[in-house]
Image (cartoon, rainbow, N blue to C red):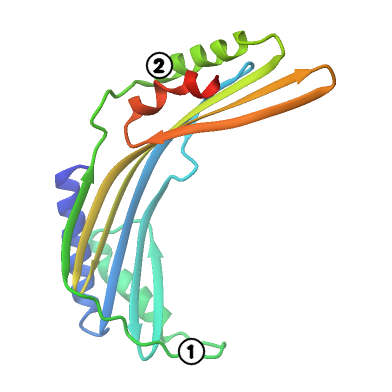
Amino acid sequence: GNNLTVELTTHKIKKLVSKLSEQYPFVSVLATDVKGKSYSVDRRSINIRPSSITECGFVCRVYKEGIYSEYSFNELEEKSIDSIIFEIDQLVTKEIKLKKVDCEMLVEEPLEKTFIRKDTKKIYSDEEILNILKEAKNYGISLNSNILNVSVSHEIVEVSKMYISNSKELDQYYTWNDTRCMVLVRKENNMKYAYDGVNSNCMEDTLTKIKEVIK
């Protein structure tokens, strides 16, 4: 999302790819930064926690003599590039005890592309999201005396990814929202539940439909 951060990251990845390309015919680096929050409300609890799909880091792939090797790391700084290359060299030259399966080297078509899709509608604060979920939970419970519990949740994630190889330079940024609900009902000795949800890249599109989904 931040242009300066993207430019700095791109510069460092290109430098790593360039140096590795001196000895490897194919080099690629995938950078991933996924951050988000998960909100949940039911009759007994209110929670905010990191999204379950949060992740951040880099994967470098190199090809040599019929074998692809991958090395993952969490940080990329100018001063750490040489040590990363050393670790990759160690990985590539490590003795393989399993039977070798020769692979052809991937030949990529040159491509440069940027994809950006931001949330274009209302952005809600933590407090506003929890208030919407609490109101939806109370609405659901009020619908019928047989309803034991209503659980509602909302998850928002921001995905930033970058792929740079000898031939390609790709980056993307997008948001995603998932609002879910579960209703638990008991009538005499018979207990049932139903689960449903709505998702969109816009927060407003999901949170404004939660009562409709519960009903």
84 above or below 131?
below
Which image quarter: residue 31? Answer: bottom left
> Relative to 175, does residue 11 appear above or below in the rendering?
below
Q: What residue type is labelled 2?
A: Glu
Sequence-first disc among 1 and 2: 1
Q: What element carries label 2?
A: helix
Secondary structure, mark 1, is: loop
Q: Name the residue under label 2.
A: 127
Q: In which quarter of the image is residue 10?
A: bottom left
Q: Residue at x 22, y 42 (%)?
A: 1
Tell me where residue 11 appears, x and y as whole percent: 16, 60
- Quarter of the image with the C terminus in it: top right
What kind of residue is marked 1? Val
In this image, 64 relative to 135: left or right? left
Camera-side residue of 179 and 187:
187
Q: Indicate which disc residue 101 carries.
A: 1
